């Protein structure tokens, strides 16, 4: 189509489909937000029909915003995984999803039981991993929500099924970090908790990774784990800023994510803009200017590298799946009025 931009479909490295209806819910921080909004709403996903109805809205929103691949948290209810992946299969989207593991410090309705949660996880792996365009991710909600027995079992499943993914949260909020230190006093850091249970490896994606030191960054690099950078959800409750300078200096994989519903938009363009703000204001060395090409890379080819899908999605090279979007650079009156000399970037595959 003349005058259009043909581009790879966007990849969202971290998003919660059950939180579609809590976008923009205000709270004093992460933990009160979970208690007051997220957990009560996620309890409704015990109803398979309700889970299916939300999955339909969620997937239609992803597709409407040009997102063709996502790594997605479901709830602690196995039916929520089945609902999401069935609806995704119907639409032909590439979706990696997992049942949340949370057997402690969680209210009735979302708290699961240790041994049953692990049996359910293995059954879901066997049902969905590698089925069409679906994949499975072992999904501890975050370390404080899991007993050592549950984390140990998750690590054993990860070793037994090396082709599946792992996804969780780490170092998002200072109160959360202090809580993790109390619960796991022998671990060097919050991130090291996951290492101790065999949950840091290739195909492991950890959301946020804000409050890291260089030892944490080196651990991410050396294990092949990747960060899902979620700038709108970090800015909304004031959790902090991902340190792009530190990530580049030490060198570990990272890509962009909406983190709906803590994140405020499904739009990759909103996420890329928020990441630009973070680069300008949130670094140990302020003033980093992320180029348009780099931001686009973080949501396509770079995001594909994080879960090991660079030969499958995220670019238009021969042999990759034909996930692409067609963009109209004159879609709005404002853009139609801009001169042809407007700034562009040709370095769209660069870090």
Image (spheres, helix red, strand yellow):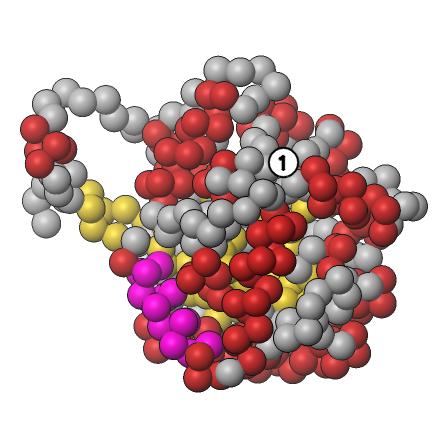
Residue 60 covered by magenta stretch: yes
For this view, does 193 lie left or right of residue 341? right
Looking at the image, can residue 163 be seen? no
Q: Residue 93, position in %: x, y? A: 37, 67
Residue located farthest toward the right when viewing the structure as drawn: 186
Q: Residues within 10 Å of mark 1 (few under 14, many from 20)?
A: many
Q: What predominant SS class does the magenta segment belong to?
A: helix
- Looking at the picture, how far across and down is residue 275, in whole percent? 45, 33
| For residue 331, side relative to residue 253 (left or right) | left
For this view, does 211 lie left or right of residue 70? right
Residue at point 44%, 84% (across, down) = 49
Q: Is residue 157 visible?
A: yes
Magenta stretch bounds: 51-63
Q: Quadrant of residue 63?
A: bottom left
Answer with left or right where residue 349 lies relative to residue 122: left
Tag 1's secondary structure?
A: loop
The quarter holding residue 247 reads: top right
Is 183 included in the stretch rendered in magenta? no
In the rendered image, the vertical position of residue 177 relative to residue 109, given as above or below: above
203 vs 237, nearest the viewer = 237
Q: Residue at x 16, y 38 (%)?
A: 329
Residue at 74% of width from left, 36% of height from top? 216
User: How far from the left and from the top, in percent, is residue 41?
Assistant: 52, 67
Q: Quadrant of residue 46?
A: bottom right
* Label 1 sits on residue: 210
């Amino acid at each position: 189509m003349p005058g259009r931009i043909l581009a790879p479909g966007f990849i969202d490295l971290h998003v919660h489909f059950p939180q579609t209806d809590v976008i923009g819910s205000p709270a004093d921080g992460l933990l009160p937000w979970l208690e007051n909004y997220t957990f009560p709403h996620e309890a409704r996903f015990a109803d398979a029909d309700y889970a299916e109805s939300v999955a339909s809205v969620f997937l239609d929103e992803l597709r409407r915003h040009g997102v063709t691949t996502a790594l997605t948290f479901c709830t602690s209810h196995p039916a929520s995984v089945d609902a999401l992946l069935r609806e995704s299969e119907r639409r032909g989207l590439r979706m990696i999803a997992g049942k949340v593991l949370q057997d402690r410090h969680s209210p009735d309705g979302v708290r699961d039981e240790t041994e049953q949660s692990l049996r359910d996880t293995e059954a879901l792996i066997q049902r969905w991993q590698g089925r069409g365009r679906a994949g499975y991710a072992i999904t501890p909600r975050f370390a404080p929500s899991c007993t050592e027995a549950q984390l140990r079992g998750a690590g054993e499943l990860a070793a037994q099924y090396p082709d599946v993914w792992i996804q969780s949260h780490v170092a998002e909020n200072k109160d959360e970090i202090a809580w993790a230190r109390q619960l796991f006093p022998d671990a060097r850091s919050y991130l090291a908790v996951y290492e101790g249970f065999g949950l840091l490896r290739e195909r492991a994606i950890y959301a946020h990774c804000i409050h890291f030191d260089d030892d944490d960054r080196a651990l991410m690099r050396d294990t092949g784990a990747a960060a899902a950078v979620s700038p709108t959800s970090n800015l909304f409750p004031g959790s902090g800023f991902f340190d792009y300078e530190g990530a580049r200096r030490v060198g570990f994989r990272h890509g962009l994510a909406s983190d709906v519903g803590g994140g405020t938009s499904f739009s990759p363009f909103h996420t890329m803009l928020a990441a630009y703000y973070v680069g300008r204001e949130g670094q140990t060395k302020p003033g980093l200017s992320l180029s348009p090409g780099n931001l686009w890379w973080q949501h396509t080819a770079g995001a594909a590298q994080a879960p090991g899908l660079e030969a499958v999605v995220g670019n238009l090279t021969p042999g990759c799946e034909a996930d692409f979007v067609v963009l109209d650079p004159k879609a709005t009156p404002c853009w139609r009025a801009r001169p042809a000399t407007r700034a562009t970037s040709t370095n769209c595959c660069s870090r």
